[in-house]
Image (cartoon, rainbow, N blue to C red):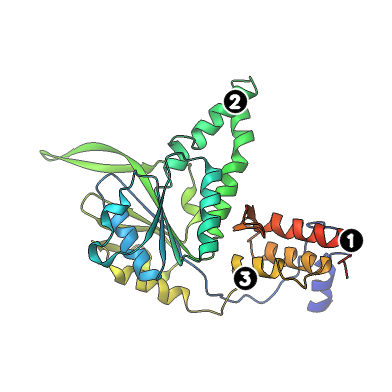
Amino acid sequence: MTNNTIAGAVAAKTQPGAGFGASADFTFRPATKEQAKARIAFDGPSGSGKTMTSLITATALGKRVAVIDTERGSASKYAGVGGFTFDTLEMYRHDPRDLVKALASAASAGYDVVVVDSLSHFWSGVGGMLEQVDAAAKRTQSGSSFVGWKESAPLERSMINALVSYPGHVIATMRVKTEWVIEGKTPRKVGLKPEQRAGIEYEFDIVGDLDPENTLVVSKSRCPSLSSAVISKPDASFAHAILAWLDDGTAAEDAMSLRAEALDGDATYQGMLALHAKTERKGLLGAAVLDGDGNPSSLGNLIKARGTMLRAAGGAA
């Protein structure tokens, strides 16, 4: 059996009229590296420099920076310091759905970099995931956290999908629980695990752990030059190493270019089926965008809604 025969045997082709997501394409293709956007997380105890390090990195990664600030305006205290110029959105409730809406707005505005300072609030803050789980358990009158998690988990998944699908660079800070240890006769504050769900680090390309002396230890990196790096007071060179790694590839379509394709005036229903399949292959169905009326939506839902409208209007050709 030839390679082409094998590929044809495992490829499930979408049939006209089958609908969105009715079948999948299992054809293997040559691997290529596309230019991507950074997904970075900084965690550390209070005073370790998470916000400052994020702003230094963001300013080196892109020209237009947006900060989603859950720390009661703390990021704004750095405005103008060290040449930092950025726009900010202060959030005092931390429903994961609100972060999705904020990311959709940032994408529409074309920000090169979004800093979420801090992501921990969407876990344990007012309206965050832990409160969502408790509220769901009470609504069902089960009192069971299992039932609460079953109902609330899709909210977190949508939030994470929106983060990793953002069409620019994303930097998220996370608080860590701390404790004091005695080394010799000297007390020292150390960080423990981040205030986030277990395994959150898998969602990021680079995870850096900051200590109270603002020393960055790269605990996870898909960028070979930064693997296991230890950097005292990280500066713009940290971001430059990331850019050199990301730019070594072919240009890639992002969520905004796919959104534009969905809203094209000459689009057809069959075109929407093909676009949905392509968007799924790229892992961008959960990207947060604004629809044609300026309302927050996932890219996948936007394409489905557009396809449904075109089909009803007779645009299935």
Give the amino acid at mark 3.
Ser
User: From this viewpoint, is residue 23 visible?
Assistant: no
- CA gap between label 2 and label 1 equals 40 Å
Furthest-front residue in this view: 293
Residue holding disc 2: 137
In-front residue for pair 297/210: 297
Q: Nearer the viewer, mark 2 or mark 3?
A: 3
Q: Residue 244: x and y, percent?
A: 41, 77
Q: Residue 143: x and y, percent?
A: 59, 20
Vertical arrangement, residue 187 with respect to residue 271, above or below: above
Of labels 1 and 3, earlier in sequence is: 1
Residue drawn at 48 percent across, 43 percent down: 198
Marks 2 & 3, CB-CB < 8 Å contact: no
Give the amino acid at mark 2.
Ala
SS of the residue under disc 2 = helix
In-front residue for pair 278/79: 79
Q: Residue 194: x and y, percent?
A: 39, 44
Of labels 2 and 1, earlier in sequence is: 1
> In terms of image quadrants, where is residue 71?
top left
Q: Which of marks 1 and 3 is in front?
A: 3
Vertical arrangement, residue 85 with respect to residue 88, above or below: below
Label placed on residue 257: 3
Residue holding disc 1: 17
- CA gap between label 1 and label 3 equals 25 Å
Label placed on residue 78: none
Residue drawn at 71 percent across, 66 percent down: 262
> In terms of image quadrants, where is residue 182?
top left
